Image (cartoon, rainbow, N blue to C red):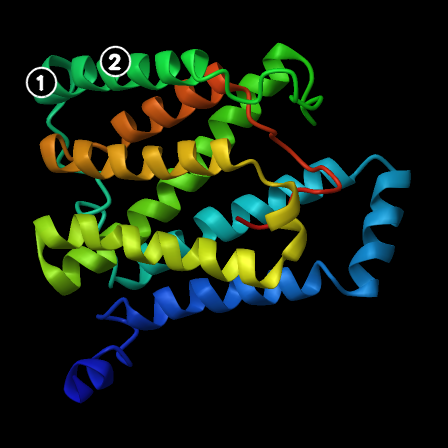
């Protein structure tokens, strides 16, 4: 174990420090969001109409920036992320139909369960085109960060157990955010949290069947469009995941 931990210090060949950096950046972002300087900055940006672009830029920088740097440095594999060596025949012939069935089951369960019926808030993103763009960006950011964790876990535990083990890293990220942001526990809907957890499990399962990042993104994107979760900045929505 000690030898393995020492090995993770080699940031150009091992993913350990990159995963740790992801958790530390999340913790710092949560702490910054509770400082007076952030409140002042937010008020200044809102008066100029710049807060929404700033919010999305900061969120996507965290979700995609660190994985991109890790890809450039070398310890994260684009193949393990499902970004290259793609088998489009199996993706379209096997993965897409299975994803369609999974999406349909999610939508039926969502509707039949009466999720948030009568309690839905106005979304931060109102127009259909803007909501579609926000859903595409949110799905891409989350899927890239989840694939980043998956690549690291596969490097540690192998293809099968690493794919499922990445869910532990995703759960750790959520736990850090919940611990550091009490308002998330008050404002978040258990239904949306369950939906996000289902997406994480489903995209992991589909990766084992057809390792194609685009399949997971499409499922995530269509699910966000079909369930209308809050997208974009709101007073009760955190800056980071």
Q: Nearer the viewer, mark 2 or mark 1?
A: 2
**Quadrant (top left/top right/bottom left/bottom right) for the N terminus:** bottom left
Residue beneath the point at 59% across and 19% down:
131
Secondary structure state at the residue bearing disc 2: helix
Q: Is residue 200 above or below residue 123?
A: below
Q: Would you say residue 239 is visible in this rendering?
A: no
Secondary structure state at the residue bearing disc 1: helix
**Does label 2 or label 1 sit earlier along the sequence?**
1
Left or right: residue 193 versus residue 133 is left
Q: Would you say residue 120 is visible in this rendering?
A: yes
Residue 124 drawn at (x, y percent): 70, 27
**Dot 2: within a 10 Å radius of its alpha carbon, few (fewer than 14), some, or many (20 or more) residues?**
some
Q: Which residue is mark 2?
A: 100
Q: Nearer the viewer, residue 139 or 178?
A: 178
Q: Which mark is residue 89?
A: 1
Residue 189 drawn at (x, y percent): 56, 36
Residue 144: quadrant of the picture: top left
Residues under labels 2 and 1: Cα distance? 16 Å
Q: Nearer the viewer, residue 60 or 166?
A: 166
**Dot 1: within a 10 Å radius of its alpha carbon, few (fewer than 14), some, or many (20 or more) residues?**
few
């Amino acid at each position: 174990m000690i030898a393995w931990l020492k090995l993770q210090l080699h940031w150009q060949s091992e993913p350990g420090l990159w995963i740790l950096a992801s958790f530390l950046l999340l913790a710092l972002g949560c702490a910054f969001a509770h400082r007076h300087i952030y409140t002042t900055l937010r008020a200044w940006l809102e008066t100029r109409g710049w807060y929404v672009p700033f919010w999305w830029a900061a969120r996507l920088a965290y979700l995609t920036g660190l994985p991109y740097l890790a890809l450039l440095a070398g310890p994260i594999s684009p193949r393990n992320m499902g970004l290259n060596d793609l088998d489009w025949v199996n993706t379209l012939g096997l993965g897409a139909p299975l994803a369609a069935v999974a999406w349909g089951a999610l939508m039926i369960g969502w509707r039949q369960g009466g999720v948030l019926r009568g309690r839905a808030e106005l979304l931060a993103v109102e127009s259909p085109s803007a909501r579609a763009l926000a859903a595409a960006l949110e799905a891409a950011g989350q899927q890239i960060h989840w694939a980043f964790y998956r690549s690291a876990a596969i490097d540690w535990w192998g293809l099968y157990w690493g794919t499922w083990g990445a869910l532990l890293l995703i759960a750790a990220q959520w736990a850090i955010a919940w611990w550091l942001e009490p308002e998330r526990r008050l404002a978040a809907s258990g239904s949306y949290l369950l939906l996000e957890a289902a997406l994480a499990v489903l995209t992991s399962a589909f990766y084992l069947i057809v390792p194609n990042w685009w399949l997971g993104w499409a499922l995530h994107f269509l699910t966000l469009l079909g369930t209308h979760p809050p997208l974009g900045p709101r007073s009760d929505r955190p800056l980071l995941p």
